[in-house]
Every structure is written in structure tokens, then in C-alpha cells.
Image (cartoon, rainbow, N blue to C red):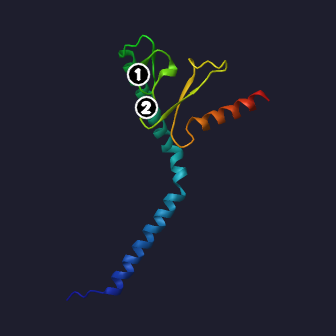
Amino acid sequence: MLRFNLRSSCSTLLLAFVFLLQLQAVMAQFESFFNMFGGQQQQQQQQQQQRSAASQFSAYIDTVSCAHYLCPLTLDCVQRPSDCPCPNAEDIKCLIPDMDGDVDDATVMCVRGKQECAEVERLMRKHSDKKRK
């Protein structure tokens, strides 16, 4: 007759569980070591994917006909960069004038929130004051 020994089964399961916990701790400890060799290959693959996405984007832009300015985020054809819309309907478009104060050549920044463009303008003034000093 085959007898089932409960104490032996529990100790075997407990031993297996402890082994798995230790294995997990060892793998976490040496993860950076393993990434030194395998991580470079993964990084190269990501760069290749980014390059291929960029080449697909530039190929798509070549097919869009626009006689003026093509907005990079929305691919809308507008008269000048300051006419570019924000990509999301809930965004608010802030115009940051160039150094001469010309709004026609302004940088477009899309923001959300209570402060809206006031916060962007405050940060721009703060940054330009530091540059002058």
C-alpha cells in the first residue's frame, strides 16, 4: 500500500517555494549585469525602429501637398507656423513670440490646465531674464 505522508509533501512544497524566492532575488540582483550584454542589442533594435518610423514619417510628408507650412503634429497645411492648431481639442494654444516680439513667427505651445498660457508666459519671462543677466 502507498501511504501519503503529509509532512513530507508540505516540506517539499515549502522547500520549492523558498528556492523560487531565492532565485527571484538572485535574478533581480544580477539584472544590471545581464543588461550590459543583452541591453545593447535591445537598444540597437529600438534605434532601428525609431529610424524606420522617422523614415516612414518623412515618406508620408513627401506625399502631402502643402505650398506653405506643414504642421508637424497635426499635418495641417497653414500659412505660417503660428497658425498650427493643437493636436487635442482640450488643449489651449499659446503663442510664444520670437526675440523681436513678432507673433507671425511665434512658437506654438499647446497646454492644459487652470493657468493656461499665463504660466507659459511667466516661465518664458523668467528664462529670458536669466539669459540677459
**Residue 87 against residue 79 in the figure, above or below:** below
* Residue located 51% across and 44% down the image: 37
Question: What is the quadrant of the C terminus in the image?
Answer: top right
Q: Quadrant of residue 88?
A: top left
Secondary structure category for the residue under label 2: loop
State the residue lying farthest toward the left: 1
Residue 84 drawn at (x, y percent): 47, 23
Work out whether residue 86 or residue 75 is closer to the camera in this orientation and state it.
86
**Residue 58 against residue 128 in the figure, above or below:** above
Number of residue marks: 2
State the residue lying farthest toward the right: 133
Secondary structure category for the residue under label 1: loop
Residue 90 drawn at (x, y percent): 44, 38
* Residue located 51% across and 58% down the image: 28
Mark positioned earlier in the residue sequence (2 or 1): 1
* 17 with respect to 6 (left or right): right
Work out whether residue 123 or residue 3 is closer to the camera in this orientation and state it.
123
Residue 105 drawn at (x, y percent): 57, 18
The crowd level at tag 1 (other Cα within 10 Å; few <14, some 14-19, many 20+) is some
Q: Quadrant of residue 95?
A: top right
Question: What is the quadrant of the N terminus in the image?
Answer: bottom left
Work out whether residue 57 or residue 10 is closer to the camera in this orientation and state it.
57
The crowd level at tag 2 (other Cα within 10 Å; few <14, some 14-19, many 20+) is some
What amino acid type is highlighted by mark number 2?
Pro
Mark number displayed over residue 76: 1
In the rendered image, which residue does mark 2 sit on?
Answer: 87
Residue 76 drawn at (x, y percent): 40, 21
State the residue lying farthest toward the top: 67
Per the model, the C-alpha gap separating discs 2 and 1 is 10 Å
**Residue 120 against residue 98 in the figure, above or below:** below
**Residue 31 against residue 22 in the figure, above or below:** above
What amino acid type is highlighted by mark number 1?
Asp
